[in-house]
Image: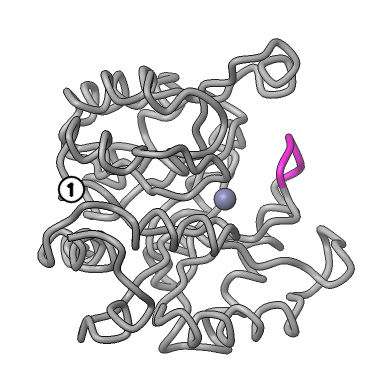
Amino acid sequence: MRYRTIEDVKRLGHPVIDCHMHVRSERGDPAGGLDIRHCDQIIEANAKLGITLSCVIDLNVTGPQPYEMFHRANDRAAAAAARHPNHMRAWCFVNPGDPRAMEEIEQRVRDENFIGVKLYNQHRLDDPMLDPILDRCAVWGVPVLSHAGRPNDAETRARQPKISDASHFAAAARKHPGTMIIEAHLGGGGDWEWALKYLRDAPSVYVDIAGSVVDEDMMDRTVAAIGAERLLFATDMTYEGSMAKALDAELSNEEFSGLMGRNFQRILARRAI
Ligand SMILES: [Zn+2]
């Protein structure tokens, strides 16, 4: 069926998980503390929409910044999870090119129960530099969520020269078949239809449905290409678009339940540390 409502989400009877959401710092200061007001607003919005768990990453560190800034960003995500322990969990955000990235991952994921590793666009996912991180996540049974896109215009490509597209996700998955890799925001950063042909043959790659592109039939064509078991609900701060995509999609009750939380619960259940 399709055209579900928020009431259908609230009736699911299992955690409804936004696997890719952001918290931010006070006044946007990358060295500052957690913006508590914004953090609490996420919980308020979630209650209205039936979302019961947000998996968060800090938003105010992005580029090639020093290790300390990533560490502070993860402090803010930890503070958010500590403030709402039943409704928020944190991703460990690192620049994989930083020599202290693995140290940060060990502290956050192994010692502080962060979900897994979040990567941005500093290095492509199939760069050999990332091999130790992807291998470690396979051993630990924790997922890797990575920013993604297939920009169609020269200007965006120039801004993100090392952005990973679906071909890089598929290549990384071939090298690390035991690693649960999540391609972020299918509807973010360009040509989602182009991505599907690579995702079809990459069974260990999951896809979050966030992103500001809300093309008609995007969900149905994605389900037709890769099935519903690898799709994960996420907003990446675009609540309306993501919820609309989920509610509008032609899905069985079981598929809808998977999208809204069960598929991600299965990922979390593989944790082995
Ligand atoms: Zn994001």
Which image quarter: residue 153? top right
Looking at the picture, how far across and down is residue 76, in whole percent?
66, 71
Q: Residue at x 75, y 16 (%)?
A: 155
Q: Nearer the viewer, residue 32 or 48?
A: 48
Looking at the picture, how far across and down is residue 266, in whole percent?
16, 63
Q: Which color scheme is applied?
A: one colour
SS type, badge 1: loop
Magenta stretch holds residue 55: no
Looking at the picture, how far across and down is residue 154, in whole percent?
70, 10
Q: Is residue 16 above or below residue 201?
A: below
Q: How would you classify the magenta stretch by its main secondary structure?
A: loop
Q: Quadrant of the N terminus?
A: bottom left
Instruction: State left or right for residue 60 relative to residue 136.
Output: right
Let me know if residue 109 appears in the view: yes
**Which residue, given by chain and number where applicable, does mark 1 sit on?**
228
Q: Nearer the viewer, residue 97 or 188?
A: 188
Which image quarter: residue 248? bottom left
| Ligand 1 within 8 angstroms of badge 1 C-beta | no
Q: Tag 1: residue type? A: Ala
Sort mark 1 into few (<14), some (14-19) or many (20+) by Cα contacts within 10 Å: many
Q: Is residue 93 above or below residue 217?
A: below
Q: Residue at x 33, y 83 (%)?
A: 7
Task: Tell me which segment is drawn in magenta.
Answer: 62-66
